[in-house]
Amino acid sequence: MDVPADFPSTLPEFEERFGTEEQCRDFLAGLRWPDGFVCPSCGSRAAFRLNVRDLWECLSCRHQTSVTAGTIFHGTRKPLVMWFRAMFHVCVDKSGLSATMLKKLMGFRSDQTAWAWLHKLRKVMVRPSRPKLEGKVEVDETFVGGVDEGAHGRGTEKPLVAAAVERVDVAGARRPALGRVRLAVIEDATQVSTTSFAAANVTTGSMVLTDGLASYAELAEAGFVHRPRVIGKNRKNASKLLPGVHRIASLLKRWLLGTHQGAVRPRYLQAYLHEFEFRFNRRKSRHRGKLVFRLAELAVAAPPHPYREIIGAGA
């Protein structure tokens, strides 16, 4: 769905547009059912709206539902107005928010509540059906986390993150422009892990640029045009031969250390990677309010993520 041209971009405009529960519900209904109500039970479009708890009742099967049922807002005890305000704060700041900052902005009593809300939003920032990367794509892995004494390179126990970024060569430019990015925590740097990551995130037939690690040897057999670059003993060659993916790794680590003070537990790291992707892939948008629209659009299309599920993520 296209973002309306008059969608609010400042907090006063946003508060005026989404200052009541009815305004928020009507907006979500438009996102969830752009062509009119559809019963989640039988698919019928014939329904009427009840005054009680703002429910819709299907005329065909009598199933009752609300606009928030089956979304991340399902069962929330907080007003939708607060959720919309939280989404605005999350999106308008280019660097994002920590749980402590969101707690202050929203007036929550605990960091735990703010963290849970942020994590729910991170869980929906990536569409499962999004198109894969294509064209010329750089792929590499990097370790994310603090320094491990006595462990270096691929021998460390820090989380390993695979990164892929579209590379757009620009005539006359010193470095290629960057397109979309994909990030994922992988178990190890074996052929199975690296090839699976590429297959899940890059369109078959694309040119994949990697270093000379043997684990990338199966990319050609997997249907990619593989172009390995031997880095050699000089580590500075890595950023020269694969500038895009190394820039992404640097930005990711700087963001985790800056916004989140490096306090990201490994089992929750993938959700933070989703947030980084969401921000980076929409970095050219000057209208920050449009990001709120996209996040709300993703939120009503995603299934509920109960607090217990979030706490147990990756455990």
Image (tube, grey):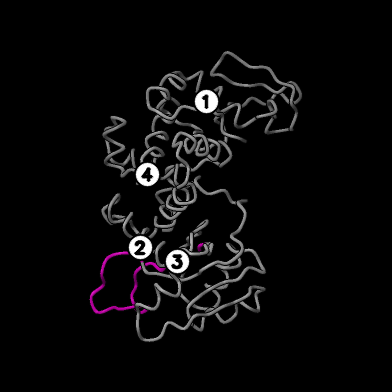
The crowding category of the residue bearing disc 4, from other C-alpha atoms within 10 Å (few below 14, some 14 to 19, many at least 20), is few
- Give residue 94's mark: 4
Disc 2 secondary structure class: helix
- Which residue corresponds to the image point at 58% horizontal and 60% vertical from the top-left? 133
- Which residue corresponds to the image point at 41% horizontal and 74% vertical from the top-left? 240
Which is more N-terminal, label 2 or label 3? 3
Work out whether 233 lies above or below 153: below
Which is more N-terminal, label 1 or label 3? 1
Disc 1 secondary structure class: loop
- Give residue 300's mark: none
Tell me the kind of residue under disc 2: Ser
The crowding category of the residue bearing disc 3, from other C-alpha atoms within 10 Å (few below 14, some 14 to 19, many at least 20), is many
What separation in Å lies between label 1 and label 4 (alpha carbons)? 21 Å
Which is more N-terminal, label 2 or label 1? 1
Residue identifier under label 1: 6
Q: Quadrant of residue 302?
A: top right
What separation in Å lies between label 4 and label 3 (alpha carbons)? 20 Å
Tell me the kind of residue under disc 4: Lys
From the image, which quarter does the N terminus lie in?
Answer: top right
- Give residue 250's mark: 2
Work out whether 107 lies above or below 276: above
Reply yes or no: does residue 154 show up in magenta: yes
What separation in Å lies between label 3 and label 2 (alpha carbons)? 9 Å
Q: Quadrant of residue 226?
A: bottom right
Relative image position of residue 51 (x, y in whole percent): 58, 13
- Which residue corresponds to the image point at 37% horizontal and 27% vertical from the top-left? 11
Q: Which residues are magenta?
A: 144-165
